[in-house]
Image (spheres, helix red, strand yellow):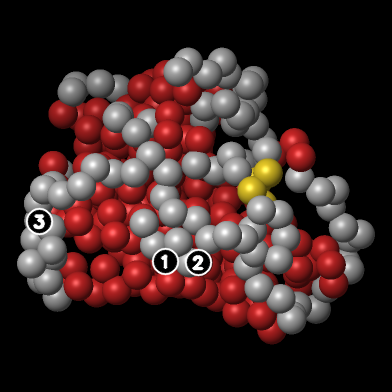
Amino acid sequence: MQTLREACVAVLLTAGADAKADAARALFARWQAGGIRFSAEGPDVPDRPARPARPELLPPGAMPKRKRAGSPAMRFALLHALAHIEFNAIDLAIDLVARWGAGMPRAFTNDWLRIADEEAQHFALVQGLLRAGGGTYGDLPAHDGLWEAAQLTAHDLEARLALVPQVLEARGLDVTPAMIERFEAMGDEAAAAVLKRILADEIGHVEAGNRWFRELCAESVTEASGRFRQLVTQLFRGSVKPPFNDSARRQAGLTTEWYTALGGAAPVSKR
């Protein structure tokens, strides 16, 4: 029987976008069916997951300028950017389990493999919208900054839970409602419905990150919100600034004192 580490690394080393999404879903199904041995035995976790030949990955500052508002090209670009985020989110969830799953309670692995399954579903939904528009994921360049947070936190679970679900995914809670409104204004109810599904699921993803972060802080008798702000200030290379979707964040356990005290200033990264 394949170990948890072996199964996760196999997904990480799957390069094709659709194949990776399918592999993540299959892994969760096997886990639920008892077909994965709860063990950290296996190969080293790769520093970077395998990627398809396309899209071309560029530094964030080198990305092409946005298309004209309301145009079919802008619609495709928005959906392509969303597909890229969801594709990376599959690997982020699987990487979390590969590194720490077998050393945490089984409920932790169950949460994050479920989240990987949901991210794979999100990717497939957005990929379907792209294909309905005559294209596919990979047709446009994408930025290569999404994996940086994983590399910065590869040996610290507290830091990973602070930066990925509670900063990067929480930002999705802030910006997605405006994207839904934009697609509705264009009369694109199909895209708006997919985004509504993603937003509902992402609240649960941020909640899982917040809940397990609180668990770790409780074990070390550390005040959770202060530890969160400390880690974000030390490690996050962007800025945490409004507008915030306070309602969605509160549902996920991120009450305002967790993030408003960060002040929106761009912290200094310490490697």
**Residue type at the position of mark 1:** Lys
**Residue type at the position of mark 3:** Phe
Helix, strand or loop under label 2: helix
User: Residue beneath label 1, please?
Assistant: 20
Helix, strand or loop under label 1: helix
Task: Give the answer, above or below, for where 220 lies relative to 189.
Answer: above
From the viewer's perspective, is the residue at label 2 or at label 3 nearer?
2
Q: Where residue 55 sits in the image (x, y, percent)?
A: 64, 58
Mark positioned earlier in the residue sequence (2 or 3): 2
Per the model, the C-alpha gap separating discs 2 and 1 is: 5 Å
Q: Quadrant of residue 75?
A: bottom right
Task: Please count the marks in the image.
Answer: 3
The extreme front residue here reads 53
Measuring 10% from the left and 71% from the top, which residue is drawn there?
A: 34
From the viewer's perspective, is the residue at label 1 or at label 3 nearer?
1
User: Residue beneath label 3, please?
Assistant: 38
Measuring 71% from the left and 76% from the top, which residue is drawn there?
A: 135
Measuring 63% from the left and 21% from the top, which residue is drawn there?
A: 266
**Residue type at the position of mark 2:** Ala
Which part of the image, by quadrant, shows the C terminus? top left
Q: Where residue 170 sits in the image (x, y, percent)?
A: 52, 45
Circles 1 and 3, Cβ within 8 Å, touching? The answer is no
Query: For mark 1, does the 10 Å Cα neighbourhood hold few (<14), some (14 to 19), or many (20 or more) residues?
Result: many
User: Which sits in the foreground, 108 or 120?
Assistant: 120
Per the model, the C-alpha gap separating discs 1 and 3 is: 21 Å
As drawn, the label of residue 263 is: none
The extreme right residue here reads 68
Task: Give the answer, above or below, for where 18 lies relative to 177.
Answer: below
Task: Give the answer, above or below, for where 247 lies relative to 114.
Answer: above
As drawn, the label of residue 17 is: 2
Circles 2 and 1, Cβ within 8 Å, touching? The answer is yes
